[in-house]
């Protein structure tokens, strides 16, 4: 019983010592990235400029959602005292962070998470 209590106290001590290091990174931007998406390009048969733009808009919307979900997962995993709500975050930024040939791209969502209310 005494060994178990000492192990619990030791684990709690390690958690208390490591918590400030984790909290310090939560005051900076955290970045979440989407999977690779592809939109139509002029190389596709019958792809008009309006079809290309509509395809890119749809693909970007899906990628944006994935990037925000990746950001939320990182905040949940690394910042226990911070909110995972994107609308409460500060200095939010959503942008295309990588573009490759053939209409492929990824989207990055970065922001500083707000403190939890409760």
Image (cartoon, rainbow, N blue to C red):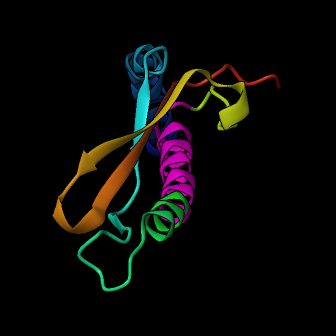
Q: Quadrant of residue 113?
A: top right
Which residue corresponds to the image point at 48% horizontal and 50% vertical from the top-left?
67
Q: Relative to 111, is 47 above or below?
A: below
Identify the main secondary structure in magenta.
helix
> Which quarter of the rendering shows the C terminus?
top right
Position of 95 compared to 91: left or right?
Answer: left
User: Which segment did they paint magenta?
Assistant: 58-79
Which residue corresponds to the image point at 52% horizontal and 48% vertical from the top-left?
73
User: Which residue occupies the extreme right position in the image?
Assistant: 118
User: Which residue occupies the extreme left position in the image?
Assistant: 101
Depth check, front residue: 52 or 99: 52
Which residue corresponds to the image point at 40% horizontal and 55% vertical from the top-left?
34
Q: Relative to 36, is 88 above or below?
A: above
Q: Quadrant of residue 96?
A: top left
How many numbered discs, if any?
0
Q: Is residue 10 visible?
A: no
Which residue corresponds to the image point at 64% horizontal and 25% vertical from the top-left?
89
What percent of the width, then of the height, locates residue 62? 54, 62
What percent of the width, then of the height, locates residue 20? 44, 14
Position of 14 compared to 115: left or right?
Answer: left
What percent of the width, then of the height, locates residue 94? 49, 36
What percent of the width, then of the height, locates residue 71? 50, 42
Q: Is residue 63 visible?
A: yes
Position of 70 compared to 100: left or right?
Answer: right
Depth check, front residue: 61 or 67: 61
Q: Is residue 105 magenta?
A: no
Depth check, front residue: 78 or 62: 62
């Amino acid at each position: 019983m005494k060994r178990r209590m000492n192990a619990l106290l030791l684990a709690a001590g390690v958690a208390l010592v490591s918590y400030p290091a984790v909290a310090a990174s939560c005051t900076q931007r955290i970045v979440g990235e989407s999977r690779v998406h592809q939109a139509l390009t002029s190389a596709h048969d019958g792809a008009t400029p309006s079809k290309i733009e509509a395809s890119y808009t749809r693909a970007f919307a899906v990628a944006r959602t994935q990037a925000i979900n990746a950001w939320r997962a990182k905040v949940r995993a690394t910042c226990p005292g911070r909110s995972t709500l994107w609308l409460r975050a500060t200095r939010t930024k959503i942008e295309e962070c990588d573009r490759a040939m053939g209409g492929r791209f990824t989207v990055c969502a970065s922001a500083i998470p707000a403190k939890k209310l409760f």
